[in-house]
């Protein structure tokens, strides 16, 4: 069923947003756009949208004639015991906000539409999915690659935009698209942060007031680590002082804190930074897992 959200009588000019819940409705709208020679930008999300998502929607609207946003909480990227059942959901607000950000079509598949009975296929991307989030969430990138592969086949966008907040995910998708000869351009969007620098995330809603205060320190530590790398401090010293700063800031433990090259996520060797890299961090704070990353260029 395709229904008009803002103005049911409006012509299909891009000024009003439609929703689609079946593949037939999705394809009817997108096929019509393609026949008109329009370019299509795509932003996949899991809903509970915030300014980080809206920035990607606006980026798409600036680069494509039409923008599609999917909202789908993908069961395949949650392990048993993770927060699939409690993942924040607020579809009515999400739809109003993306319409405001110039989305033309919201794709809202149900789990049954995405994975109908008898579904058997999965996509896995090897090396770049290992380590960092792939180490503590071994199921995760397979679930992401599978759903994004399906979403790209469903929407067939000209380009798709992914946030640099999930930098490893962005590289996994780039690798998959290259390896499977998928005809879509993958773009990255910059990390959008709260006023204290905390990277925006749907899961930040889980934080208690005290945890939220502590969480604001994570970006400061990795930004400082990037500064140290850029003035030539050895990577191993930067990591050990960064670990101490994170624990001193009140985080109970660190999942990972590492310096990886931006092209392939290979680990920056000991000594001075020699190639463009990012500081990557993940911590568990109460029931909330926080991830963040910060760019660091080698000293000229
Ligand atoms: P999610 O709904 O968490 O699966 O995220 C959907 C998309 O939004 C992904 O490409 C994320 O990387 C991106 N995203 C999430 N948070 C941010 C943020 N704070 N800044 C930029 N992009 C983000």
Image (cartoon, grey):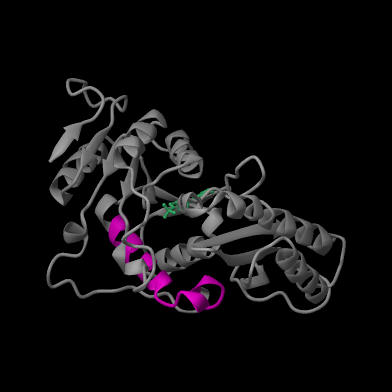
Main secondary structure along the magenta-highlighted residues: helix
| Position of residue 290 measured from the top left corner of the image (x, y, whole percent) | 55, 60
Image quadrant where residue 131 sits: bottom right
**Does residue 262 appear in this view?**
no
Specify the segment rendered in magenta. Answer: 129-152
| Position of residue 251 measured from the top left corner of the image (x, y, whole percent) | 65, 64
Q: Quadrant of the C terminus?
A: bottom right
Magenta stretch containing residue 206, yes or no? no
Magenta stretch containing residue 142, yes or no? yes
Residue lying at 59% horizontally and 71% vertically, measured from the top left: 264
Q: Nearer the viewer, residue 85 or 70?
A: 85
Q: Nearer the viewer, residue 136 or 173?
A: 136
| Position of residue 158 measured from the top left corner of the image (x, y, whole percent) | 37, 47
Residue lying at 21% horizontally and 59% vertically, measured from the top left: 111
| Position of residue 191 measured from the top left corner of the image (x, y, whole percent) | 58, 48
Q: Is residue 165 above or below residue 76?
A: above
Give the number of marks.
Answer: 0
Q: Is residue 249 left or right of residue 213?
A: right
């Amino acid at each position: 069923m395709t229904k008009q959200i803002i103005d049911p009588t409006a012509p299909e000019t891009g000024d009003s947003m439609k929703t689609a819940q079946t593949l037939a409705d999705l394809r009817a709208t997108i096929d019509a756009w393609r026949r008109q020679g329009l370019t299509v930008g795509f932003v996949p999300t899991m809903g509970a949208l915030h300014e980080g998502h809206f920035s990607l929607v606006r980026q798409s609207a600036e680069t494509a004639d039409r923008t599609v946003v999917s909202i789908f909480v993908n069961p395949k990227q949650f392990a048993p015991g993770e927060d699939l059942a409690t993942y924040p959901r607020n579809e009515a607000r999400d739809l109003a906000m993306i319409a405001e950000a110039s989305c033309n079509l919201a794709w809202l598949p149900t789990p049954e539409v995405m994975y109908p009975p008898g579904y058997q296929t999965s996509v896995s991307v090897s090396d770049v999915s290992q380590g960092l989030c792939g180490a503590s969430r071994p199921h995760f990138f397979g679930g992401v690659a599978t759903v994004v592969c399906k979403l790209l086949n469903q929407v067939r966008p000209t380009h798709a935009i992914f946030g640099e907040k999930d930098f490893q995910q962005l590289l996994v998708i780039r690798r998959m698209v290259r390896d499977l000869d998928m005809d879509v351009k993958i773009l990255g969007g910059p990390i959008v942060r709260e006023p204290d620098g905390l990277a925006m995330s749907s899961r930040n809603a889980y934080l208690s007031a005290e945890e939220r205060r502590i969480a604001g320190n994570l970006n400061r530590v990795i930004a400082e680590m990037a500064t140290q790398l850029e003035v030539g401090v050895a990577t191993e010293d930067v990591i050990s002082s960064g670990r101490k700063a994170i624990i001193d800031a009140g985080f109970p433990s660190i999942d990972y804190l590492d310096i990886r090259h931006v092209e392939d996520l290979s680990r920056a060797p000991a000594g001075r930074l020699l190639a463009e890299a990012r500081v990557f961090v993940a911590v568990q704070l109460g029931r909330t897992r926080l991830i963040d990353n910060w760019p660091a260029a080698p000293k000229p």
